[in-house]
Image (cartoon, helix red, strand yellow):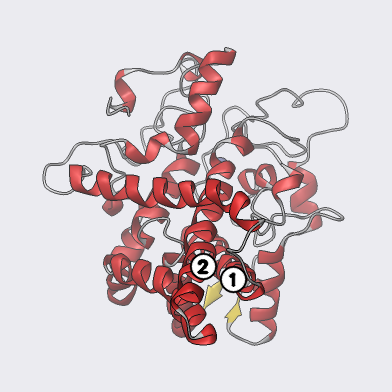
Amino acid sequence: MSTTPHRSRPPRVVAARSPEPASAPPSGEQRRPGGERHSTVERFALGLFIVVPFLALLAAVPLAWGWGVSWLDLALLTVCYFVTCHGITVGFHRHFTHGAFKAGRRTRIALAVAGSMALEGPLVRWVADHRRHHRHSDAPGDPHSPWRYGESVPALLKGLWWAHTGWMFDAERTCARTYAPDLLDDPVLSRISRRFGLWATVSLTTPALVGGLATWSWQGALTAFFWGSLVRVALLHHVTWSINSLCHAVGKRPFRSRDRSANVWWLAVLSCGESWHNLHHADPTCARHGVDRLQLDSSARLIRLLELAGWVWDVRWPRGSRLDARRVPPTGAGTGPRNRREGEPVETA
Ligand SMILES: [Zn+2]
Ligand SMILES: [Zn+2]
């Protein structure tokens, strides 16, 4: 577990990048006494949230062959997985972080609660970390770049671990006042964010309650908790974290971005469309990430349904000319591993 501040050990791969513009907001690694560092208790709780579901996931396959799974358990796993995953992708990510569409107050509350139930941390912290990721993607200041330690194979393997899980144990915390002032100043949303423990409890206990009541047995409650809570949380954690790690290391890069973001097709269904990550970094406010033919993006479908229902509006759907301007030409410049257009202003949202 590394607690070394990011800045003290600049990675070789990003050392040559241009310095941060004078107008840029201060980096999130600033130490501020009394609230900008994770406490030991917080990090212990974080470890529990990560390790216990992961152990459950490891135990899940042998159990699936035996007595320990029912159709109800699988249904709970699937429903809870996709409800909370879309809470993250449509809510935390596309709406609250990037403003890809506008939404009414009830819809915003529902999205904030659904995302909180994914157990990926409180809303304000998630959004602050992710805006900082876009502000500094694959450069010093990025909270979870897999290129942090360099480009050699051992450095990349270490970086992938860091981007996948290790970064969350860093004692330094992104400054929420710098990166998510809009959410902090919204009394309802900041209250939902502060009550993360409540949403985590609801998320973990609901499957057990449903399983227990439906089968009227402790065994039904136990297996529903195992599959609908532990396995579901572990699976979603690792899919989400793969966007931070794998989708900045491997995959196709049809669009120009300032970093190493890439499209990873085989994660599209489980990530609800988020693994079209190269397009996302090329056009962060776009409501659809899978913009090309056969690129599944269930989050975009859900946003469209919400738009048809009148619950969201001003959706930033992809436009042909905007996409074409961002495409890598079939031949020539821009096809390297880093498709960064030097000298461009940095777009954070
Ligand atoms: Zn990214
Ligand atoms: Zn993003």
Q: Are marks 2 and 1 in contact (CB under 8 Å)?
A: yes
Q: Residues within 10 Å of mark 1 (few under 14, many from 20)?
A: many
- Residue ID for mark 2: 223
- Element assignment for label 2: helix
Q: Is residue 136 above or below residue 218?
A: above
Residue 23 x %, y %: 37, 38
Question: 83 or 318: which is nearer to us?
Answer: 83
Question: Upstream in the sequence, badge 2 or badge 1?
Answer: 1
Amino acid type, mark 1: Asp
Residue at position x 16%, y 41% in the image: 32
User: Of tags 2 and 1, which is closer to the observer?
Assistant: 2
Left or right of 202, for residue 273: right
Left or right of 67, for residue 87: left
- Residue ID for mark 1: 73
Residue 178 x %, y %: 30, 49
Residue 87 x %, y %: 52, 67
How many dots with numbers?
2
Q: Is residue 152 above or below residue 268?
A: above
Amino acid type, mark 2: Thr
- Element assignment for label 1: helix
Query: If the image is split into quadrants, where does the N terminus sit?
Result: top left
Left or right of 257, for residue 40: left
Residue at position x 49%, y 30% in the image: 161
Residue 108 x %, y %: 46, 76
The image quadrant in which ligand 1 is located = top right
CA gap between label 2 and label 1 equals 7 Å
Q: Residue furthest left?
A: 34
Q: Residues within 10 Å of mark 2 (few under 14, many from 20)?
A: many
Left or right of 125, for residue 207: right
Q: Is residue 171 above or below residue 120?
A: above
Residue at position x 29%, y 64% in the image: 184
Q: Is residue 14 above or below residue 166?
A: above
